[in-house]
């Protein structure tokens, strides 16, 4: 899971801590991942989110033996799945950010990862990073870095962060950047 909340300081941290605790509790239950969001969105403690910032989140379950990825995107930036063939798949299925509409239902998306595919899950701080001319790094630059993907997850993350740092230069960072990179290896899945 990768999540983000609008805002800064203590209120944002409390919202994220509440989300984390809720999902940790729900993860221990024998329920489908879509139901985690449905239940979390409707918890009484979370009904105040809309007034103080709505968390976005991306949650996925990977079955290593088959490569099947089941996911729910709750209003989060669309993760990028770069297949070894070069095809780019955006993981957008889900619903609104949490807390916006009580009773909202979240849909599950599915994909399959094969050997040497790359999955990038990120927060908006990556694509919204600005240089001293107030230009955003943007998705085209991010996708351009991924188009030549071939190294390990760590190498790909280092290349992406180096690209962002070079673009931003000495400009002050205005938002945090979180990235999760997964590279599949092996002859099969």
Image (cartoon, grey):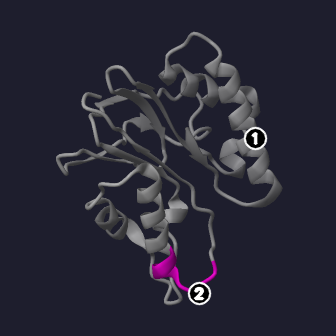
- The outermost residue toward the top is 30
Circle 1: element type: helix
**Quarter that holds the N terminus:** top right
Instruction: Spot the residue most to the right.
Output: 10
Mark 2 falls on what kind of element?
loop
Residue 47 shows in this picture: no
Which of 42/141 is in front? 141
Q: Which residue shows up at 42% across the image and 34% down it?
A: 94
Residue at the image point whose x is 42% and y is 66% from the top: 159
Is 125 situated left or right of 13 in this image? left
Q: Position of residue 127 (x, y in %)?
A: 45, 66
Place of residue 83 in the rendered image (x, y in percent of width and height, measured from the top left): 24, 44
Q: Residue 158: give x, y in percent of width and height.
A: 48, 63
17 is higher (above) or lower (below) than 178: above
- Reading the image, the residue beneath label 1 is 17
Foreground disc of the pair 2, 1: 2
Query: Gap in Å between the C-alphas at discs 2 and 1?
Result: 31 Å
Where does the magenta region start and end?
165-172
Give the left or right position of residue 157, taking residue 86 as reference: right
Residue at x-position 55% and y-position 63%: 125
Q: Is residue 184 above or below residue 105?
A: below
Q: Which mark is residue 170?
A: 2
């Amino acid at each position: 899971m990768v999540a983000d909340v609008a805002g800064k300081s203590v209120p944002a941290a409390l919202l994220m801590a509440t989300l984390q605790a809720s999902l940790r509790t729900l993860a221990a239950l024998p329920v489908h991942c879509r139901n985690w969001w449905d239940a979390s969105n409707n918890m009484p403690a979370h009904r105040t989110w809309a007034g103080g910032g709505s968390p976005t989140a991306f949650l996925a379950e990977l079955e290593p033996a088959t490569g099947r990825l089941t996911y729910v995107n709750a209003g989060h930036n669309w993760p990028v799945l770069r297949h070894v063939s070069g095809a780019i798949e955006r993981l957008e299925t889900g619903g609104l950010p949490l807390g916006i509409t009580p009773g909202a239902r979240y849909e599950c998306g599915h994909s399959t990862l094969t050997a040497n595919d790359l999955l990038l899950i990120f927060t908006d701080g990556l694509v919204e990073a600005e240089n001293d001319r107030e230009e955003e790094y943007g998705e085209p630059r991010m996708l351009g870095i991924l188009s030549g993907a071939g190294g390990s997850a760590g190498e790909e993350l280092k290349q992406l962060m180096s690209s962002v740092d070079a673009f931003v230069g000495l400009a002050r960072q205005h938002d945090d950047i979180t990235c999760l990179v997964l590279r599949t290896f092996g002859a099969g899945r």
